[in-house]
């Protein structure tokens, strides 16, 4: 005999801890082999890597996992691949989004509107580098469909190089999990 348990929320008996969550409410993901994109820009480009989730609760948190591949045009690059995530039209790497704050850099330093910086790794710059990061969106405040997207850019392009994203022989993953709050 098969059993099935269905609930809307899982909350610990002692309540949700500060800066914590209850259980996973739902998971959606996008997993694919992409075509290669390239840019010489220092402005963020939409990589096409995205997933959409419709939260059941406006108070829940969205846990975002991103795994992707990038490389630079030559082995002499001294650049950085800079990554961030957008929720619809909002850059979550802005650094000044209340509970989503990603600041904390040294005094006087800007946040560069980003979440992660990946060094080109000379002499590895021309090789395909895997990267991943996780972020919690704790302030979406919505039960409407939300689309999260991965954006990338170069840091300065001082060396005149090209940043490449995606490779058709490797799998990119973008996963969203709604966590009860």
Image: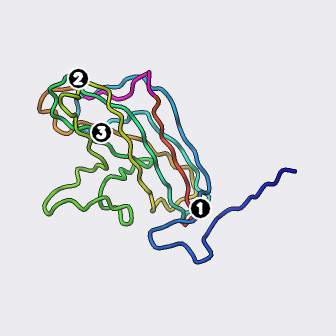
Q: Main secondary structure of the magenta part?
A: loop
Residue 56 pos. (x, y %):
62, 58
Q: Nearer the viewer, mark 3 or mark 1?
A: 1
**Camera-side residue: 67 or 152?**
67
Residue 17 pos. (x, y %):
50, 73
Q: Residue at x 38, y 61 (%)?
A: 100
Task: Quote the CA–CA distance across marks 3 and 1.
Answer: 33 Å
Magenta span includes 165: yes
Task: Quote the CA–CA distance across marks 2 and 1.
Answer: 43 Å
Label 3 Cα crowd, 10 Å radius (few <14 / some 14-19 / many 20+):
some
Q: Are marks 3 and 2 in contact (CB under 8 Å)?
A: no
Judged left or right of residue 37, residue 9 is right
- Specify the quadrant of the image occupied by residue 9: bottom right
Magenta span includes 64: no
* Range covered by the magenta-colored residues: 163-170
Q: Are marks 2 and 1 in contact (CB under 8 Å)?
A: no
Q: In the rendered structure, which disc, 3 or 1, sits on the residue that comes first in sequence?
A: 1
Residue 94 pos. (x, y %):
30, 54
Judged left or right of residue 89, residue 52 is right
In the picture of the structure, the residue carrying the numbered disc 2 is 73
In the picture of the structure, the residue carrying the numbered disc 1 is 23
Q: Residue at x 57, y 45 (%)?
A: 28
Secondary element at tag 2: loop
Q: In the rendered structure, which disc, 3 or 2, sits on the residue that comes first in sequence?
A: 3
Residue 119 pos. (x, y %):
22, 39
Residue 44 circle label: 3
Secondary element at tag 3: loop
Secondary element at tag 1: loop
Q: Are marks 3 and 1 in contact (CB under 8 Å)?
A: no
Please say if 28 is above or below 18: above
**Camera-side residue: 53 or 75?**
75
Residue 98 circle label: none
């Amino acid at each position: 005999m098969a059993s099935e348990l269905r609930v809307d929320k899982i909350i610990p008996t002692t309540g949700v801890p500060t800066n914590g969550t209850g259980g996973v409410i739902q998971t959606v993901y996008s997993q694919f082999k992409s075509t290669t994109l390239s840019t010489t820009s220092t402005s963020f480009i939409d990589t096409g890597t995205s997933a959409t989730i419709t939260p059941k609760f406006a108070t829940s948190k969205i846990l975002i996992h991103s795994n992707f591949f990038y490389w630079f045009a030559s082995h002499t690059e001294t650049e950085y691949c800079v990554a961030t995530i957008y929720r619809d039209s909002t850059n979550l790497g802005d650094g000044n989004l209340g509970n989503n704050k990603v600041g904390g850099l040294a005094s006087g330093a800007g946040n560069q509107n980003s979440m992660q910086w990946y060094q080109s790794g000379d002499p590895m710059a021309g090789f395909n580098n895997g990267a991943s990061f996780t972020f919690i969106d704790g302030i979406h405040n919505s039960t409407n469909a939300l689309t999260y997207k991965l954006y990338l850019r170069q840091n300065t392009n001082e060396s005149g190089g090209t940043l490449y994203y995606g490779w058709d022989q490797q799998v990119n993953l973008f996963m969203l999990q709604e966590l009860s709050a």
